[in-house]
Image (cartoon, rainbow, N blue to C red):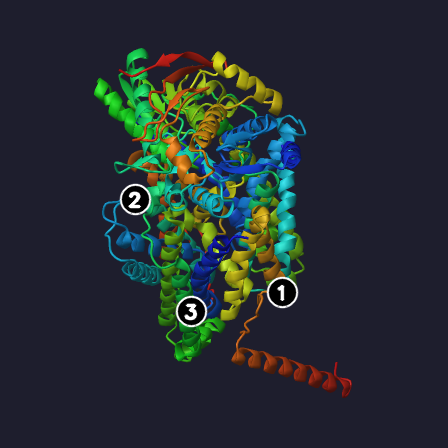
Amino acid sequence: MDFSYILGILTLAGINLIAVLGLSLLTGFTGLFSFGHAGFMLIGAYVGVWFNQPAGGSPAGLGLPFLVGLVAGAVASGLMAWIIGKITLRLKGDYFCIATLGFGEAIRLVFDNFQGFGGSRGWPLTITPGPSMIWIILACDLVGVLFLANLIRSRHGRNMIAVREEELAAQIAGVNVVRYKMLSLIVSAVYAGVAGYLLANYLTFLQPKIFNLQKSTELTIIVIFGGLGSISGSVIGALVLTILPEMLRFFSIWRFVFYGAAVILIMVARPQGLMGGMELSPAGLRKARAARLARRAILAESEAGSNQGGRR
Amino acid sequence: MRKILFALLFVAMVWSGYAADEVIKVGWFGALTGDQAVWGDTEFNTVKMLFEEYNAKGGIEVGGKTYKLQVIGYDNKGDAQESVNVVRRLVSQDKVVGILGPNSSGNAIPIAGILEQYKVPDIATVATNPKVTVMNGKVKPYNFRVCFIDPYQGAVAAGYSYEKLKARKAAILYDISDDYSQGLRDFFIQNFVKLGGKIVADESFKGGDVDFRAQLSKIKASNPDIIFMPHFFKEVALSARQARELGITSTLIGGDGWPSEQLISIGGKAVEGSYIVNHLDYKDPDVADFRARYRARFAKDAELNAFLVHDAVLMLVDGLKRAGKVNGEALAKAFTTTDIIGITGRIKISAETHNPEGKDAAIQKIVNGDYEFIGKYSPR
Amino acid sequence: MIQFLQQLINGLSLGSVYALMAVGYSLVYSIMNFSNFAHGGVIMLGAYFGFFAITALKLPFLPAFIVAILGTGLLAVIIERVAYKPLRDRKAPFLYFIISAMGASIFLENIVIATIGPTFKSYPPIFDFTPLQLGQIAVGRLDAIAFIVSAVSLTALVLFIERTRLGKAIQASSYNMKACTLMGVNTDLVVLVVFALGGILAGVAGVFFGMKYTVYPQIGNITLKSFIAAVFGGLGSLPGAVLGSLLLGVIETLVAGYLSSQYRDLIAFVILIGVLVLRPSGIMGKVAEDKA
């Protein structure tokens, strides 16, 4: 086992985690499914790279520093999310889903046809050697998790969860449903954009088909696998589902077979995913324990109740 | 196929265990799955066969020591991103001293950065786009190839069409998602127009498309003398069939992305009478010996790429011997002065471009489902 | 003018392939109210079944064709039992069905890649490709046959749904499944038949697609366009699916012919987004119910 190889896998896992965290907010906590998030990754990647690549390259960039590219990519993705949100957020459930699919693919096709960025042939990147990718990614992961955790615990987060649980009721209770859906979408897109930019820099090669429907679906699958509504679930899911296939490269051809079967299994048998909405944190574990005790109490009471009298 | 692989592995293990010699690890990558699998397959088989032959004679001598040759091969699925992945694996984890392949320019161009970072040279087999070795006027220190390049190939195709086939109006159908196809189309147009010809239709599709009738109808309406199809055999076969279905009778001409048994088996009568610019004549007596050995070993015919990877192997072994040590940087330096005779011709590498100088093109015509050699052609 | 007519014919023949695929989507949607993304995988396997029936089982064309479509009909039913029935029984939200469908589609595509291999296979040439000439316009022989078979299959389907008792049950279920159960309709059987029919149509589409364009595991991705066609024509409406498909085929071909072939895929997704935003019920669809 080579150190640089392990580093490579961890880097990829870290990048995936960022995108998954964002999607987790949208899907796990706000209840909106998206099959087009790779599109936001693509925008973050291309805009960021365009800002960052040297002006003499082919295709040419703007030659600005790495961090400027990162911010540019993130902002561009957020902007795109705002535009898309304005158009699609009023659609119901599965129609929104299909619309995100449409947008994800449309974005990819637009960049495929735009020759200025290399089109479908791709953009080989000149990477200036600097601090190791892994530190940047770890930093982003940390910031990402902390920000998300805080957001969820805040009033905004609670409103998003309310939208997920019962949209109509939340609206009646005075929650601005559209506003929170939009906020959730934009934040998730920004996360995806950052992930896309980092991915491009890691691969040293950028091509629209990296960000295809398969990638979008992969992200959604990881979120579902980890469990909707659980940050630690998303973290575990992203790590496991990125590292495992790389380690079992022999079986990498079966990886998507496993994904497909796993998704069906999860939907049929355990839709709450791995963590089932629970968190792997002190507060989370306490909540889980409380829930378990409550369930036991209710069961005990109903049993005791049915022993009284012949009420069938 | 799998049985042969395992048998090979067993043989290789026995041979290497037998002498307990040191081993030189060489990487190979190419398409073992996907549209171009037939080419990757033939390349990998050839490398394995040649390495076996060397090892059977005791191995090769580098810097006074004898080494056995070991190939570590990966499938890049014909994909550029996957190519970057497997090359990274080859140089950082498997620690190979040199890499053979890929056959496709689109896959060869993006790997330059990693090669330079880890100082491991690569010999591309049939990647013909100039950007593989020279980008923005600068030569890439770790990229080399054994085949001719597209400015030359485009000139040959254009020259032959104009001069020998007397075509004055040409139509083009190319793959816009592929560096090879795009580049070849550019050079064809440049040369054909310079000779006085006219491009009457210039249509494109995206790799993976299967229906070309919209583009072909436009081509038909432009009434060309000849249609240039600088893309790969699967799409050529489909587009040729659809062209004939639309009633297009113009002659078709293509480049080295065509030649494969599958072109004939899928294209059938649609490609009959078409011309191809190729790297060599398969019936050349110089290659007959290799063809026979390949056939004996694998029970099928060698495809185009086999001949070129054969010469890449010769170049690699020659480079190692002259470098005198098993080191990527030294090997790359040795490559810049390569001058050997391979079965595809003389391979004299230019230090400025890392390309072989003066390789001739062979014109083939598809006659009765077979590739018939028409002659060598050099553009004026 | 001739050019335009030729492109029109090209578009219609492309559209008739989409139509076969789109009808399957619409059929399932009309009953189950979700988009069966696994349909693409079934079509792909139809192409493979036909291929192996001809090459491995050495059957002549017609028996191989029958074997293929029966195979896909069975496959569709199996998918329904495994991936959707448990969700139906649990009255799971419709979103779960879509996810499960996605999972099934990924599973099918990749199990073929893992077992049979991702390299394409091609049908032995069965029909000649000298074209049929209608004046200056050329129509491919295979295209003409595919068009006729599509028309026949779709007519048979419509007759079945309009004239038979089971067909009426299907129609009724598409309006209100629950009420039908109360009225004594065996809704389980209805669902089974609907999926089987969808599967058979998928098989027809798959075999013709494979013959025209070679057989490969990613065929399911092309059916994304037929899904867009179904949405365009109105999910849940069979004539809508056919109309949407023909229109999409023609629009796509005209865009490729007159604008640039690069936009042919993009225009499909633009249409999709346009339909969803402006008129989600499509051209002929039922008015979208409240999905709150």
Q: Look at label 2 and name its amino acid.
A: Phe
Q: Secondary structure at mark 1?
A: loop
Confirm whether circles 2 and 3 share one chain. Answer: yes
Kindly identify which residue carries mark 3.
Answer: A142
Kindly identify which residue carries mark 1.
Answer: C90
Query: Around disc 2, counting alpha carbons within 10 Å, would you say few (fewer than 14), some (14 to 19), or many (20 or more)?
Result: few
Q: Look at label 3 and name its amino acid.
A: Leu
Question: To which chain does the residue with label 3 belong?
Answer: A
**Residue B324, percent across and down?**
45, 33
Q: Secondary structure at mark 3?
A: helix
Q: Look at label 1 and name its amino acid.
A: Arg
Residue at 33% over, 45% down? A123
Residue at 29% over, 12% down? B163
Q: Nearer the viewer, mark 2 or mark 3?
A: 3
Q: Nearer the viewer, residue B76 or B365?
A: B76
Q: From mark 2 to mark 3, how far is it between C-alphas? A: 35 Å
Q: Are marks 2 and 1 in contact (CB under 8 Å)?
A: no
Question: To which chain does the residue with label 2 belong?
Answer: A
Asked which quadrant contains residue C268, the reply is top left
Confirm whether circles 1 and 3 share one chain. Answer: no
Kindly identify which residue carries mark 2.
Answer: A114
**Residue B21, percent across and down?**
60, 36
Left or right of residue A289, residue B231 in this image: left
Q: Is residue C89 above or below residue C151?
A: below
